[in-house]
């Protein structure tokens, strides 16, 4: 736990006590904006200045587009936002490639404001929605809150104003269901982030995924690469989905429902389904504001595939301006196109395979393909990614392993544990949905979650998604 | 009535919450370190007392700290290697480094790597809070048990801030290890220590520094505050180190003196000032600036002594870069810091390595005249 985490816990707890007695929704909005700015300022006052600047700029741009919703006006807003994001996120990455000038030293000192990718995309979605003439008339206070809302400003979910605005304008009474659900989500998130951290750092020194990726430069066998790819896929999932649970739960404590970000992604049986379950808020953003407008540009079938690949490349580059992330996006795009082609083929020729065979086969293929893609996402360099992928396609590399057995056990335990919990949850939903958990049992479970997520894991690893 | 019931259930819930936290802490200790579920489990289980003072409890284990059957941190002794004993206090014993990464362990690996074979064994005979005076009293017992050829002396001078703390040792005859006293059985909330650690990580440094300053003020009652350590104390420190050198040489062990390194560079940052306050918490009678002056003078005393007694000197205070990369607090190493220390010591011991390499693989290392190994 860091000082900042403690600050968040203290400030949010105080805010929760102050929030519910307020009956006027504007007062509630004011309180939420105040704590949002207070918490964001803990990352740096300059960052807060940039957030406020971007919020005011986009509020003005929204009004500009609303007065006359033309493509030209929208483009002004889009380009300004891309320039803003690009200056902080991509310029430092491309500076070394440019000829050396005095500007290089000026821009080399640029520090990426926390969560800029998330709140800039929220601003863009607002401009798109205004352009589409959706009924959005936020007050300045509401828009500032939408941009800076403390649960989402750091790492999403990327919300839409259309889903947040009605909630900002309500003044519900405190409900036991909101508190219960919020605490459940927070505790689930704590346990998941702890698992993610265990995978990253390992149960013993030098036996985690981080060590395997960062300290070993060659010599992985195919089994090692699969272990790392699957392990990293779950580390990322536990880390990010755990974080999303925590912020969704925290917002729920205030009676606010945020968009979901994950829906059992590793149960997907196709890449398309996976992307409807993984980082859903961004995935849907890309679909609605990039892929669909791109597809509309041309009617040809091949263009649809190109649009898909382009969208996924942007998805990759959204994470970081690097060749590896572009390759990761390209890889995901190709997977989606291939899946589309297979679907078309299946429709043309009704293949005689029974569902009980195609289902597990599709799942296995999807799971393997998605996990393999994480190599591109996590590798430290192109040569490392290539060496790892080469090992996967070399049959002789399946006969031995180099990584410690402890890491294999840890990854297997997490993977099988996860699917085991999924199965139990499925049974619970089917047969015991109506059974209420007594408050005492809840307290015991919360306590165990707090121990695992906070006290056991006192040395927290930097949250992976902060870097985006 | 409904409200009363809710309050009672709420209180019960909080009790359950606390009990489950404690249960989890105990299960965690059992799974992570093999700790017993019920008995007390804290740093005290690592130590026992004899007529000289605190010492390691043979075979004890607490979290990452594991003592061998002689009560020294590290593995059991093995025969057929040249032994180097590391004398010192908590900096040598190791506090913040990962398990097996305290500088004596890293030094052993470094020496053996340079020698190309397992020629060396470094024995960490230090213990937390050990002064030079008590270390001197332990020399006969350590020599008998370990048979070291060399002794690295990394003395902490802080105990000499207040001379009454540097006790006059009892007669050497009484220094033999006594039976380890049993660990007193009492209930302890293990979760308390975890919450304390968590708060230490999470509380902003200005709050922690403020709390420390309050503690310092409260502890000042029995002391007069000094700007710098009196010269008498420095002389006493020099005399005690000199005595340790003499006693070791008399036992056939060649000492190597090491100056005391700290996290502080030539200029002090704001976090350095916080660190000095953290250091002063243990020695409230000395003002913060006095610590830097003390380190300078005590290290000069070590350098002077090394020159006078022709003892090999490793000037760690000058050679280890200051800063939080190498130091977890004012003077205790991080794992990388311990690695640098081990490397500098190995550089200093290069002549010993060379002679050991020349000696070849067949010959056993030279030994002082003493009885046979216990292990």
Image (tube, coloured by chain):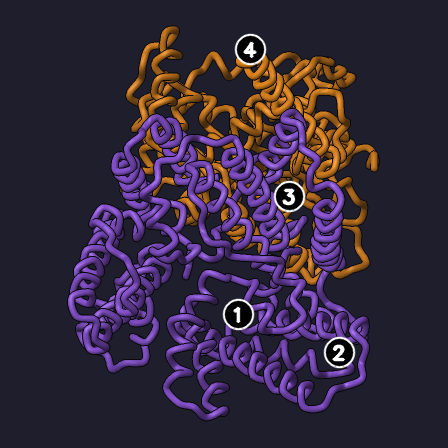
Chain colours: A purple, B orange
| Disc marking residue A397 | 2
Rendered position, A201 above or below B286:
below
Disc 2 sits on a residue from what chain? A
Q: Specify the quadrant that holds the C terminus of chain B.
A: top right
Q: Position of residue A6 (x, y in %)?
A: 42, 35
Eye-nearest disc, 1 or 2? 1
Q: Position of residue A444 (x, y in %)?
A: 65, 29
User: Do marks 1 and 4 share a subunit?
Assistant: no
> Which residue is painted at 30% across and 63% down in the image?
A134
Asked if residue B326 shows in the view, the reply is: yes
User: In the structure shown, which secondary structural element does the residue marked by tag 4 occupy?
Assistant: helix
Eye-nearest disc, 2 or 4? 4
User: In the structure shown, which secondary structural element does the residue marked by tag 2 occupy?
Assistant: helix
Disc 3 sits on a residue from what chain? B
User: In the structure shown, which secondary structural element does the residue marked by tag 1 occupy?
Assistant: helix
User: In the structure shown, which secondary structural element does the residue marked by tag 3 occupy?
Assistant: loop
User: Do marks 2 and 4 share a subunit?
Assistant: no
Eye-nearest disc, 1 or 3? 1
> Which residue is painted at 59% across and 43% down in the image?
A188
User: Do marks 1 and 3 share a subunit?
Assistant: no
Q: Are the two marked residues, 1 and 2, in contact with CB atoms closer than 8 angstroms? A: no
Q: Which residue is mark 3?
A: B99
Q: Which residue is mark 1?
A: A377
Q: Earlier in the sequence, mark 1 or mark 2?
A: 1
Q: Which residue is mark 4?
A: B4
> Could you tell whether B347 is left or right of A99 in the image?
right
Disc 1 sits on a residue from what chain? A
Alpha carbon distance from label 1 to label 3:
32 Å
Asked if residue B144 shows in the view, the reply is: no
Viewer-proximal residue among B288 and B147: B288
């Amino acid at each position: 736990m860091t000082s900042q985490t403690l600050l968040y816990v203290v400030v949010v707890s105080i805010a929760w006590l102050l929030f519910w007695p307020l009956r006027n929704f504007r007062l509630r909005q004011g309180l939420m904006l105040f704590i949002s700015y207070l918490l964001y300022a803990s990352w740096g006052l300059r960052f807060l200045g940039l957030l406020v600047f971007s919020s005011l700029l986009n509020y003005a741009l929204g009004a500009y587009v609303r007065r006359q919703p033309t493509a030209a006006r929208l483009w002004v807003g889009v380009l300004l936002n891309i320039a803003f994001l690009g200056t902080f996120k991509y310029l430092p990455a491309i500076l070394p490639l440019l000829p050396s000038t005095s500007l290089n030293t000026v821009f080399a000192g640029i520090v990426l404001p926390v969560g800029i990718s998330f709140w800039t995309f929220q601003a863009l979605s607002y401009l798109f929605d205004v352009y589409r003439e959706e009924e959005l008339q936020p007050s300045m206070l509401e828009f500032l809150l939408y941009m800076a809302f403390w649960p989402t400003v750091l790492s999403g979910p990327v919300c839409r104003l259309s889903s947040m605005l009605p909630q900002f304008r309500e003044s519900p009474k405190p409900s036991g269901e909101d508190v219960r659900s919020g605490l459940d989500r927070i505790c689930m998130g704590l346990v998941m982030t702890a698992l993610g951290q265990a995978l990253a750092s390992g149960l013993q020194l030098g036996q985690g995924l981080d060590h395997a990726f960062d300290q070993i430069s060659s010599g992985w066998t195919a089994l090692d690469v699969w272990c790392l790819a699957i392990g990293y896929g779950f580390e990322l999932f536990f880390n990010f989905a755990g974080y999303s649970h925590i912020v969704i739960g925290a917002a729920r404590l205030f009676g606010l429902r945020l968009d979901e970000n994950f829906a059992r992604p590793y149960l997907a049986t196709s890449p398309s389904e996976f992307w409807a379950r993984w980082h859903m808020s961004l995935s849907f953003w890309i679909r609605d504001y990039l892929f669909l407008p791109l597809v509309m540009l041309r009617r040809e079938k091949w263009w649809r595939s190109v649009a898909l690949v382009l969208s996924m490349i942007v998805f990759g580059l959204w994470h970081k301006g690097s060749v590896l992330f572009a390759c990761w996006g390209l890889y995901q795009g190709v997977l989606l196109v291939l899946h589309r082609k297979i679907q078309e083929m299946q429709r043309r020729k009704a293949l005689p395979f029974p569902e009980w065979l195609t289902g597990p086969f599709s799942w296995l293929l999807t799971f393997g393909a998605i996990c393999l893609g994480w190599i591109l996402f996590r590798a430290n360099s192109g040569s490392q990614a290539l060496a790892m992928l080469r090992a996967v396609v070399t049959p002789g590399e399946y006969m031995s392993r180099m990584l410690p057995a402890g890491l294999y056990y840890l990854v297997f335990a997490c993977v099988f544990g996860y699917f085991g919990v999924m199965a139990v949850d499925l049974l619970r939903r089917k047969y015991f949905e109506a059974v209420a958990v007594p408050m005492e049992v809840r307290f015991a479970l919360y306590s165990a979650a707090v121990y695992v997520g906070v006290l056991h894991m006192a040395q927290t690893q930097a949250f992976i998604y902060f870097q985006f | 009535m409904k409200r009363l019931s809710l309050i009672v259930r709420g209180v019960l819930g909080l009790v359950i919450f606390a009990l489950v936290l404690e249960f989890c802490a105990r299960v965690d200790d059992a799974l992570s370190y093999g700790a017993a579920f019920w008995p007390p489990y804290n740093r005290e289980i690592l130590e026992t007392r004899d007529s000289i003072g605190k010492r390691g409890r043979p075979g004890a284990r607490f979290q990452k700290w594991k003592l061998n059957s002689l009560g020294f941190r590290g593995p059991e002794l093995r025969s057929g290697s040249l032994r180097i004993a590391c004398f010192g206090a908590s900096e040598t014993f190791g506090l913040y480094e990962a398990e097996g990464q305290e500088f004596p362990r890293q030094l052993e690996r470094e020496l053996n790597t340079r020698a190309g074979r397992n020629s060396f064994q470094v024995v960490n005979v230090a213990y937390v809070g050990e002064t030079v005076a008590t270390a001197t009293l332990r020399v006969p017992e350590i020599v008998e048990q370990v048979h070291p050829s060399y002794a690295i002396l990394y003395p902490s001078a802080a105990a000499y801030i207040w001379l009454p703390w540097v006790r006059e040792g009892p007669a050497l005859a009484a220094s033999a290890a006594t039976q380890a006293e049993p660990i007193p059985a009492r209930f302890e909330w293990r979760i308390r220590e975890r919450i304390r650690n968590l708060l230490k990580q999470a509380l902003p440094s200005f709050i922690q520094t403020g709390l420390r300053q309050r503690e310092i003020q409260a502890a000042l009652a029995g002391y007069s505050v000094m700007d710098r350590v009196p010269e008498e104390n420095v002389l006493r420190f020099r005399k005690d180190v000199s005595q340790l050198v003499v006693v070791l040489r008399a036992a056939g062990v060649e000492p190597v003196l090491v100056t005391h390194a700290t996290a502080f560079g030539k200029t002090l940052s704001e976090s350095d000032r916080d660190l000095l306050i953290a250091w002063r918490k243990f020695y409230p009678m000395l003002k913060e600036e006095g610590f830097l002056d003390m380190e300078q003078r005590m290290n000069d005393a070590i350098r002077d002594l090394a020159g006078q007694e022709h003892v090999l000197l490793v000037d760690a205070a000058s050679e280890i870069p200051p800063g939080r990369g190498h130091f977890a607090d004012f003077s205790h190493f991080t794992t990388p810091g311990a690695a640098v220390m081990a490397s500098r010591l190995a550089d200093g011991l290069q002549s010993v390595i060379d002679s050991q390499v020349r000696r070849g693989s067949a010959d056993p290392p030279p030994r002082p005249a003493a009885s046979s190994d216990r292990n």
